[in-house]
Image (cartoon, rainbow, N blue to C red):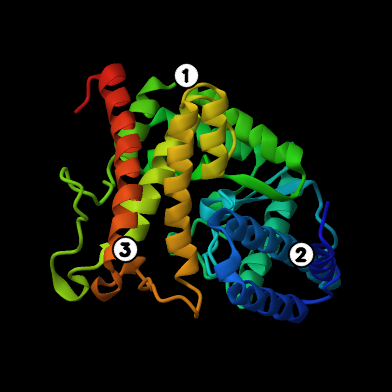
Amino acid sequence: MLSPDREKRLLDIAGAGDLTALIEIRQKEQNRLATKVAAFKASDLVESLNELHDALIARTIALAENDLARMGLGAPPVPYAYMLLGSGGRREQTTYSDQDSCLVYADTADEDKAALYRVYFARLSEKIVNDLIAMEYPPCEGEVMSNNAEWRLPLSGWMEKIDGWFAEPAWENVRYLLIFADARHIYGDSALADQVKSHFFGDMLNHPVIAKRMMENTIRRKVLVGVFGQLLTEQYGEDAGSLDVKYGAYIPMVNAFRLLAIQANIRETSTFGRIECLRRAKLLDDDEAAEYAEAFSFLLEIRMFTETPNESVRLTASGKIPAERLTKVLRTQLKKALKSGRKIQRRVQREMQDRFGGR
């Protein structure tokens, strides 16, 4: 049951008549969350913040549709689905996560209509991406967004693209498959999104070489804890002594549980959800699931709580904790979480050796 405050917040977003109103709501709600951050558990903050992001993004898309209609382009000519990737797809966005998205729309055999659809959805995607930038969702540096034609296709185009990624196990294609594994429907026709994701998982069963490449990609980023439990901080340059929390702790755990979920045909996209589904499937026991959830919760706390103005720990723009912020207490907490991260990463590596004979 929705609390009165939560219900009002969602109603305010759904009723926002323009982008300016949405920007004001976002600023107000993020400020509200920041003032109460000390009272939140990491999982509760993640849930509340990502519910806010989902509602804001969905309303931005609806308003973009309305704007195109006022410009004379009409309503969407066919059903389509807007999907979030990356941290948005995993429901793990921080306060100012960037955009990662894709769009799938219904097919037609009529080439004239197909050309019309391409133009309409190109205009719509451009409008959505630009409006989200105005909402302070930065663009993806790798251009994995719906305004990139490579990530905006009809259903048949997506089927062909996914087949192509699977057919050629080059590093870049494997990276795209791992990105797409986090895709989550947020607006439009959910059946289209389901069809694309079902095709992705169906292809996985027929391409064991891709599974090996995914494992290799997954263990590429090592958890930054040494064999004796010491933190592996930056050794050189202006970041010397800092710890890369994003790429040396958070991302390795995200990658490991994503891969284990893909191999088990688990379609949940959040890391917490993947851990729970793996537990239910008896691929993790209760103690393991609790350990990994606790470790991941702490890493999310570090990522999210350090963005707020009233906390003493700070991340740099690169996702690193500066040396002067690595207190004895924080080091102890990080070592415990990173040991769990190393443990699950070693499991993935062992499975790769058992199945494929790799290093």
Residue 342 lies, in percent from the top left, at 29, 41
Residue 77 lies, in percent from the top left, at 81, 52
Q: Nearer the viewer, residue 149 or 209?
A: 209
Mark 1 crowd level (few <14, some 14–19, many ≥20, 10 Å Cα): few
Residue 2 occupies which quadrant of the picture? bottom right
Q: According to the image, label 1 marks what residue?
A: 206
The answer to which of marks 1 and 3 sits earlier in the sequence is 1
> What residue is shown at x 47% (from left), y 72% (from top)?
307
Residue 64 occupies which quadrant of the picture? bottom right
Are dots 1 and 2 in contact, CB under 8 Å? no
The answer to which of marks 3 and 2 sits earlier in the sequence is 2
Instruction: Please determine whether, in this image, residue 79 is positioned above or below residue 44.
Output: above
Q: Amino acid at mark 1?
A: Asn
69 vs 277, left or right, is right
> What residue is shown at x 85% (from left), y 66% (from top)?
11
Q: According to the image, label 2 marks what residue?
A: 59
Mark 2 crowd level (few <14, some 14–19, many ≥20, 10 Å Cα): many
Instruction: Please determine whether, in this image, residue 158 is positioned above or below residue 302.
Output: above
Residue 21 lies, in percent from the top left, at 77, 79
The answer to which of marks 1 and 2 sits earlier in the sequence is 2
Instruction: Please determine whether, in this image, residue 162 is positioned above or below residue 55.
Output: above
- Number of marks in picture: 3
Q: Nearer the viewer, residue 252 or 47?
A: 47
Distance from label 3 to label 2 (Cα)? 42 Å
Distance from label 1 to label 3 (Cα)? 48 Å
Q: Amino acid at mark 3?
A: Val
Q: Amino acid at mark 2?
A: Arg
